Image: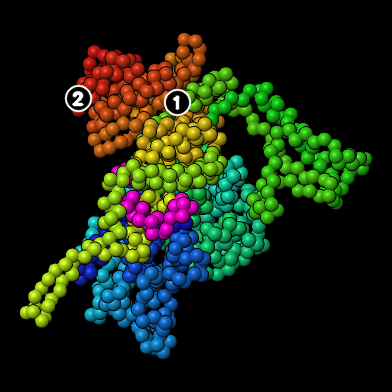
Amino acid sequence: MRVELKDFQTNAVITLYDRLRQMRSAYERDGALSSVCLSSVTGSGKTVMCAAVIEALFFGNDALGLAPDERAAVLWVSDSPSLNDQTHARFVSCSDKLADWPGDTRCLEDVSNTFCAAHEVLDPRHVYFLSKDLLGRGNKLVKGGEENSGRVFWDVLDRTIKDPEINLYLFIDEAHRGFGTNASGGKAEETIYGNLVNGYEDRAPMPMVVGVSATPERFEARMDGMRNRDRKARVSVSPTDVQESGLIKDTIELRVPESDDPVEHQYLTMAAKRFQLCREHWDAYCQAEGEQFVWPLMIVQVKDKQSPESLREMCDQISKIVPGLNEASSFANVFGDHKDLTAGRYLIPYVRPELVQVSPHIQVLFAKEAISNGWDCPRAEVIFSQRNRKDPTYIAQLIGRMVRTPLARRVEADDLLNSIACYLPQFNRDATQGVVDYLTGKTDKMGGTAVAKVTVQPVTVRAAAPRTQEDYEREQAAYERAEAARREAEKREPGYQFEFGDEPENVQAKIDFASTRTIEEPADDNLRRGTAAVIEYGSAVKLTPMAPPKPLTPRDASFTHEEWDGIRKAFESIEVRRNPKKARNEFVSLLRTATLFMDAGIDRDAGRRVNEDFARNLAGALVSCEDEVGPVHADIETTNTKLIRIDKRHGNEVTEYGEEVVVDDEGIAKAAREADTVFGGRELTNAYRKRLLSEGKTRRQMNLDLAAACRTASVVSTLSEWAKTERTNLFDKGSTEYDLLSDKHKQRYRELESETGSKLTTRMQWPETVNVKAAETRWPKHIVQEEDGLCPLDLNDDETYVVSRELERSRTVAFYRNPAESMSPLAFSIPYTSPVGRKAVHPDFIFFIRDAEGAIRPSIIDPHGSYLADAVPKLKGYVEYLREYPDTFIQALSISSLSEGPDRFRSLNLLDPKVQDAIMGFDGDMAEELYRCPLSHKYE
């Protein structure tokens, strides 16, 4: 594969492959028909998972231990030619074995109207993409005729299924469509799919059927109703795993009007401003991280009937806010009539939906309904919709196609880039609930999106960094100097009209750039983005205008510089524990770690050293484990056979002899292939072959050693321990380089470090700009605020009481509402062991208070639900963390509401050794007993 699968994708690939192996065995054994469904939410990469399964069917997968089915052929069916085109393109882009380039038909082939002319059967190691419409009544593919050499597709399928040298697998994309009462094509479409599965007019039924869908219920119900077909347990992907992988954006923001006032014009302006903000943030992020540029896209969903004049007005409005849009190339449409449009001076050509993602010059896309099923566009960041409140499905489906992250990972440095902004001027709060239900999987039309949070009317809060009047005056002076320099530079431009008395100054005069930041990009990027740039005109320089300083706000005065520095220092001192995970294969994990260290510049020699060390350790293990290796070696090199002789001359006398036959070189080489699977692929095994080749050993000896090594438990165990230790040593070496890595490499570093089995610690990301849910109650002293110095927080009664009490204390400088999302880089979490496995608890609040010496320290005050089933394990997780990091927090209180009245709130001091001992020694189920014991205290 050209892409590395996420852990949840790998698990799904292995499970689905195993189901297919069982289905194939059952069919070969007794002709049993079967089906299975791959069910995963939109944006999780179902197409990539299917490509990996098919690649393994055709060629095997050494790293995952999957053997090939050399007779496998795949028929991939959908109800949309454009969806097939996108799937075909995605297979090419993610699989290096199915195709080398987009036109490579070695393994991937589209079924056309004249397909049967060149095909009597479907060939093994081929994927055939078929649109179900081609099987409709009257189409050439099912009529035969001269163009198809008299063949019909149903007969091609029949011959393929009956051929013992071919194992045919049917994959049905978007399998919920065409099965069930809501299938878009009704009975006719159902019949086509039914004929494919059951066999047309008494032809052979499909042996193995795979449904691919986010909503598997309809497909599975249909399979249950088909004759003599065994439905296997579905292969499901957890939405939580998808979200935590970073493939899906964290937040969908929905903005709707509070009243029925006409706000469409204003909402388009707001959407355009957000789009420009996304462009600026992506530019800054990609340049800072050295990433390939992300080209954000704004989608404008219009009403069914649109005049050229109305389109022109919208283009004008957007262009006034978003600089650098090209009238001839920045706009496009995906309307159903497939027509190129002209709106005043703007060209708005039709573009096929599957080409939008790979057409970065398109920055504003006009659509009407949902663009197409299966279409996704990770670079889409903003949507403005004119659809009314009667059309929630159209909007929700379109938003659902925008949830994938552009870089296939979370952007930890900027929370804005992990969200989608939606502006719905024709909706209200009540009508919006249908969209929210759809996106969160509470309706069955698409199965949700796995997005962690859908926020209606989000409020943007920013870090309350202090700015004084002196700061403002310095910014104003810098702005005035930059403006003066820019005006002087303008006089050097060709064609500049000097006023009477003006004297051109020396072009080489010093220009005070103040704090202006200039971004240099190629000319085409400047035209596209309209961002700051340096453009030379002979010897003259055109400077970027500097934005004037923003006026002071109450947020600027929330903290002093001294307080702010102390808050940040305390915030960044908090160590976050993450749950480790077990490596699937120690050797694969080691190779991936070495690759990361080379790519990130931590250790350019890691790959070579790992290969050489493996070869040396394998040679040593074969010697040290010689007593166990020897018999295995002999078993591989020779095979015992029985010779039975029947003597016809002597009354059919039967004599049996045992013979020992030496296995030929090809058989030894075949036995050695298992080592590729055990040792994580061919890189390490080839390193051993290279070592033996340099020593003058034969290929037979190399293969014998590898075949014996992978079958000797002590050798595999010894090498696995070496790989684990080597990986740990690499991370010990890399720990000092971590802070210098790019965002991409930091994420990859943490993913791989978590497989070491050691305790993984990270730091929280400082929140700069965060979108939160609107709330009636707004609080001071939060570290992120609106301009008025307050932060909206939706708190329950217990949380409200705690925050009120803590803010009344003179020692409290600031506080932070800790996000509950475990995958958020802004969140503080503590691992604990629950009855169902390892989880993480997220304290509700971190307060920043002054200690006796006046230093600002972090403090946990957590309103804890003692009634929850896992309350006791959470408390034990707290104690384990605080014992390991006893000096991180100056205070750690767990608070529980037990009853009404003056003693309602009781607290446990989690830093008290006696309390810690009581919690760790507690074997009861109800945490309330701990809050009522003498070690607890009244909280007020």
* Amino acid residing under circle 2: Asp
Q: Earlier in the sequence, mark 1 or mark 2?
A: 1
Residue at screen point 62% across, 66% down: 342
- Tell me: residue 889, above or below residue 659: above
* Nearest to the observer: residue 120 or residue 388: 120
Q: Is residue 415 above or below residue 640?
A: above
Residue 406, position as x, y percentages in the image = 50, 50
Residue 323 belongs to magenta span: no
- The residue at which mark 1 appears reads as 574
What crowding class fits label 2: few (fewer than 14 Cα within 10 Å), some (14-19), or many (20 or more)? few
Name the residue that disc number 2 marks. 923
* The N terminus lies in quadrant: bottom left
> In this orientation, which residue lies closer to the viewer: 140 or 380?
140
Q: Is residue 14 left or right of residue 254?
A: left
Q: Residue furthest top?
A: 852
Give the side of residue 265 with respect to residue 720, left or right: right
The residue type indicated by label 1 comes to Ile
